[in-house]
């Protein structure tokens, strides 16, 4: 029990996190919640205080998630052509669109209840950045959760957990005003642009400056897809997310610059200034869970040092997790939160225990930590990475050993460059040193990536398999600390169970199925035919590739779970036992679908079962009924809304059977 006695927050924090997952998994429990409360109270009175504490932690986590659950849109907010005003809290670019999260606080010129709104702006020509106040006219609707295929990625789910309750499509001409929002926090957030401009100045190469801007200012979008893929394949993707290593390097540089205060006996003043500057850095980079965790732990360490108290790393990590999740329970689903906390927890638990050298051989033990630290971190984060990214970097150890030697110097040089830049200095020799260090890091990542088998991709894990792995890892930790045969036996049994899970719960899926999906830009049919996933789209040839790339990302879960490698075009003339394409006619299991994307109707030798009317058709909808005689007319999502509603009205007056893809996809099995 020594591990728990020295880290009393650990048995509370783990159930606290489980309680949050429990709320998002089962929802409101109502009066049933009184049962675990009664059990916890009874166990506490029976002096089973550890178990009572764990149950209480689970209850507190559940209640925290319940109280902080996102609310609905305020009453009276929805409506067409209303004037809204709010501050942009986040923005990303996707192709030619800008997706923003706006904290709205005004409707039609009057103050309203604040709510978060997802806004889609179909242009990059208007300069809008975070911390800007934007005023616009739009039709606000509740946030939708539209998925067409099983296991499809729903990007709105993560936004919903962060408190986004509505969405709007903003026409560029409807933006009335864009101004910089004032305020202390907003001004600090804008400092990242100043940091980025300093790092881009001087003789520093563009690749090195982009890397430093991504890793110090938090602007990951500046990196090219090639560089992001290279660092990911070599097992160095964690370098691109600001975390504990970055914060510790920043704290070390600040300590050096504030050392004169220590010399004059103002050690506490130097510590307080370091804490203040670290929190300013956290605000500047967006207070992501990984940065907040690092700054919280560093704050606890500095406070313990100034007050001459012992610093308990695991306790500090648990306190940081509880503090972050108490404010933002949704952060538990953040990939950055999961990777950051699991990496640090695994390092604390396993790095020392896996080191074969005793403390008497300090030099050998210190060098061996270059291996045990990345191995320990991968024990905790590898399975999380596979779950989210469906790949595993096999040669991570090689790249991380080199990175642990180069990265502190590289990031430290970047911090020094920023500090000197603020003072008006830009030494050329520093740029040369930073360039050489980046060349070494880039070269190692490039060599590792080019090795055969460096990255295993196409992996799919279910949540149950991840839970089983962490139970096994927990039993492994108990065995390392207590060396009891019971722990070893339990770990061995759990390991066999974990490895056997994919074979025990083997899934069976349909051999063939067809989905006509919903999209406002084109109409697309996705067809599973055996071990192939085929795509037919009404998009023009120049846009068809972009549609397939988009669908490859959205349907990655569907594909991996069914062992499908890629989406390929459904070419004209394709024929199989269940599928045939002739021009714009697709036959699936004797059911014929014709896609009408122009005013000239295709000649039909056989009557179609489904006539799918797409954006390109602007003729008389009744002509389709009379000439083709389909069993059902399908109105696609890409038809302009007014024309779509007119077609629906005319079909209804005719008594024709029809449906709209705006309501649900067409699914054939």
Image: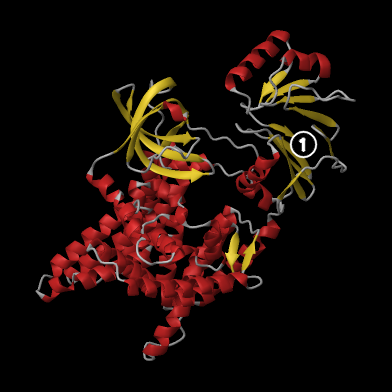
Image side of residue 572 versus residue 132, left or right: right
Using the image, determine if residue 567 lies above or below residue 351.
above
Q: What is the quadrant of residue 130 in the picture?
A: top left
| Residue drawn at the location 61% of the way across and 56% of the way down | 461
The picture places residue 332, in percent across and down from the top left corner, at 43, 51
Mark 1 crowd level (few <14, some 14–19, many ≥20, 10 Å Cα): few
Residue 483 visible in the displayed image = no
Which quarter of the image is occupied by the N terminus? bottom left
The picture places residue 255, in percent across and down from the top left corner, at 23, 71
Question: Residue 304, relative to residue 360: is it above or below?
Answer: above
Q: Quadrant of the C terminus?
A: top right
The residue that label 1 is drawn on is 669
Task: Name the spot of residue 636 as percent of width and height, x first.
Answer: 66, 27
Q: Position of residue 349 (x, y in %)?
A: 42, 71
Residue depicted at 52% across the width and 42% down the height: 155
Q: Report the front residue among 172 and 658.
A: 172
């Amino acid at each position: 029990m020594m591990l728990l006695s020295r880290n009393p927050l650990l048995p509370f924090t783990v159930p606290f996190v489980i309680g949050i997952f429990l709320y998002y998994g089962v929802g409101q429990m109502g009066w049933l919640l009184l049962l675990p409360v009664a059990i916890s109270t009874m166990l506490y009175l029976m002096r089973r205080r550890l178990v009572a504490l764990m149950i209480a932690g689970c209850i507190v986590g559940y209640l925290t998630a319940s109280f902080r659950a996102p609310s609905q849109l305020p009453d009276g907010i929805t409506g067409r052509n209303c004037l809204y005003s709010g501050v942009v809290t986040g923005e990303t670019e996707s192709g030619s669109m800008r997706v923003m999260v706006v904290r709205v606080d005004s409707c039609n010129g009057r103050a309203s209840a604040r709510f978060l709104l997802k806004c889609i702006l179909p242009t990059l020509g208007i300069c809008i950045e975070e911390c800007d106040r934007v005023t616009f006219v739009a039709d606000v609707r509740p946030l939708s959760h539209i998925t067409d295929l099983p296991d499809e990625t729903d990007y709105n789910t993560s936004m919903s957990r962060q408190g986004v309750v509505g969405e709007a499509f903003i026409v560029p001409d409807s933006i009335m005003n864009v101004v910089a929002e004032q305020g202390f926090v907003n001004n600090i957030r804008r400092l990242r642009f100043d940091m980025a401009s300093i790092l881009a100045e001087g003789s520093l190469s563009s690749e090195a400056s982009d890397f430093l801007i991504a890793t110090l200012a938090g602007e990951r979008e500046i990196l090219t897809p090639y560089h992001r893929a290279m660092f990911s394949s070599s097992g160095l993707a964690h370098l691109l997310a600001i975390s504990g290593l970055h914060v510790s390097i920043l704290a070390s540089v600040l300590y050096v610059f504030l050392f004169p205060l220590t010399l004059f006996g103002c050690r506490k003043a130097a510590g307080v200034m370091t804490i203040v500057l670290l929190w300013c850095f956290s605000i500047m980079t967006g207070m992501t869970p990984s940065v907040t965790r690092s700054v919280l732990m560093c704050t606890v360490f500095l406070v313990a040092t100034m007050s001459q108290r012992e610093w308990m790393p695991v306790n500090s990590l648990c306190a940081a997790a509880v503090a972050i999740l108490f404010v933002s329970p949704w952060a538990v689903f953040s990939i950055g939160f999961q990777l950051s906390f699991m990496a640090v927890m695994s390092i604390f638990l396993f790095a020392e225990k896996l080191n074969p050298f005793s403390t008497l051989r300090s030099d050998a033990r210190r060098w061996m930590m270059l291996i045990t630290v990345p191995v320990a971190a991968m024990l905790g984060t590898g399975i999380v990475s596979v779950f989210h990214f469906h790949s595993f970097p096999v040669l991570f150890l090689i790249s991380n050993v080199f990175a642990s030697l180069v990265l502190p110097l590289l990031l430290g040089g970047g911090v020094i460059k920023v500090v000197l830049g603020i003072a008006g200095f830009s030494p050329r020799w520093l740029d040369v040193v930073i360039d050489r260090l980046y060349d070494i890091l880039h070269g190692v990542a490039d060599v590792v990536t080019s090795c055969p088998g460096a990255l295993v991709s196409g992996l799919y894990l279910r949540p149950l398999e991840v839970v089983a792995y962490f139970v096994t890892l927990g039993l492994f930790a108990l065995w390392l600390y207590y060396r009891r045969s019971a722990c070893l036996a339990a770990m061995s049994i759990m390991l066999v169970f974990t490895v056997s899970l994919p074979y025990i719960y083997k899934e069976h899926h349909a051999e063939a199925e067809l989905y006509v999906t919903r999209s406002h830009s084109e109409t697309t049919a996705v067809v599973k035919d055996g071990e192939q996933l085929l795509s037919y789209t009404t998009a023009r040839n120049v846009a068809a590739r972009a549609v397939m790339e988009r669908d490859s990302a959205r349907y990655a879960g569907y594909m991996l779970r069914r062992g499908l490698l890629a989406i390929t075009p459904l070419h004209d003339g394709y024929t199989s036992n269940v599928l045939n394409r002739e021009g714009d006619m697709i036959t699936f299991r004797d059911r014929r679908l014709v896609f009408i994307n122009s005013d000239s109707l295709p000649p039909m030798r056989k009557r179609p079962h489904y006539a799918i009317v797409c954006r390109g058709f602007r003729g008389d909808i009744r002509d389709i009924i009379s000439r083709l005689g389909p069993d059902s007319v399908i109105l696609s999502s890409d038809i302009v809304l007014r024309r779509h509603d007119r077609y629906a009205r005319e079909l209804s007056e005719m008594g024709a059977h029809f449906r709209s893809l705006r309501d649900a996809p067409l699914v054939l099995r």
